[in-house]
Amino acid sequence: MCEAILSGLLKTGHPTSHIRISEPFDQRRDYLRSKYSVDVFADNNAAITGESETQVSKGVDVDVVVLAVKPQVVGDVVRGLSAVLTKTRPLVISIVAGVVIRDLARWIGGGSVPLVKLMPNTPALVGEGAAGMYADNNVSAEQKKQTEYVVCNVAKEYFWVDKEEGIDAVTAVSGSGPAYFFLIIEAMEKAGAELGLPADTAKRLAAQTALGAARMILTGEDDVATLRRKVTSPNGTTHAAIEKMIESKVPEGIEAGVKACNDRCSALSNEFGKL
């Protein structure tokens, strides 16, 4: 996800001298330097200060830090950055799933560092992402604009939520949402193949149909239910399919899955808060 953000920023002309990356693995550092021509450090603190024992960045001072690490290590990472973050007070944007603002602030240890929680999704990798954002009270209006600048390079739809719990709902709908659509398309592909279509043909037909349906939702004036009714002629082929799906409780299953994801987000927040 972090590489998607990096790529998106550079595609819009963001200067390479205004980006620094921290990466613990040698091979990965070499790859990022070679592909994107940005400064890459082995040490997290050095990526923020721009200086290490072996290299000095010619870039500008850091005003935004994107925190993109695994939830299991985020506590140690943020504690290790505590001194530099409280000294420089950059905007910190966390895309670490399941970690809440209060724990980030606790690990930083004070200093009123402005914190944003960001939940993108994997279609960001192809510039078609959706995202939700939550800002704590230390985040200024200008820093919200900075967040949107970062997000707009990878997401076509992005929204602020008023309460941090709203990020769990964003995760349940769009953060985990691509997997739901993959499951649906997987089932359509399987059914198409069983009906005699080549598997790849069935897959591409299902995927393009999903893409086209999404564009109709996003560009048209009708709500989703109206669009469904318009394509469902009484006693027709689509009607037969929809009735069978309703009989099989497909809508209820999807709703239950989304709510289960939301509940799991809350549980993970409690788990990671103990790190």
Image (tube, grey):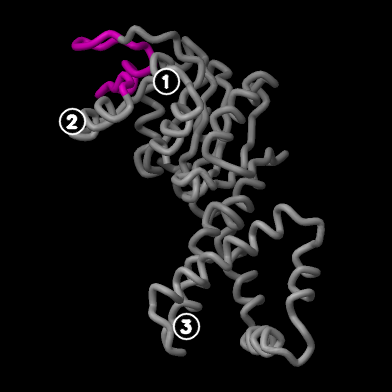
Mark-to-mark CA distance, 1 and 3: 54 Å
Q: As shown in the figure, which amino acid type bears the numbered disc 3?
A: Gly
Mark 3 vs 2: CB contact within 8 A: no
**Residue at image coords 54%, 29%:** 150
**Residue at image coords 58%, 61%:** 211
* Image location (x, y in percent) of residue 185: 50, 71
Relative to 145, is 258 above or below? Answer: below
Name the mark on residue 82.
Answer: 1
Residue stretch rendered in magenta on the structure: 37-56
Instruction: Tell which circle, 1 or 3, labels the residue nearer the N-terminal end.
Output: 1
Name the mark on residue 26.
Answer: 2
Relative to 246, is 102 above or below? Answer: above
Instruction: Tell which circle, 2 or 1, labels the residue nearer the N-terminal end.
Output: 2
- The quadrant of the image that shows the C terminus is top left
Name the mark on residue 192.
Answer: 3
Please check the rendered image and state whether residue 261 is part of the magenta-colored stretch, yes or no. no
| Mark 2: secondary structure | helix
**Residue at image coords 48%, 21%:** 14
Horizontal side of residue 158 vs 191, given as left or right: right
The label nearer to you, 3 versus 2, is 3
Q: Observer-nearest residue: 241 or 259?
A: 241
* Image location (x, y in percent) of residue 178: 51, 59
Horizontal side of residue 102 vs 200, given as left or right: right
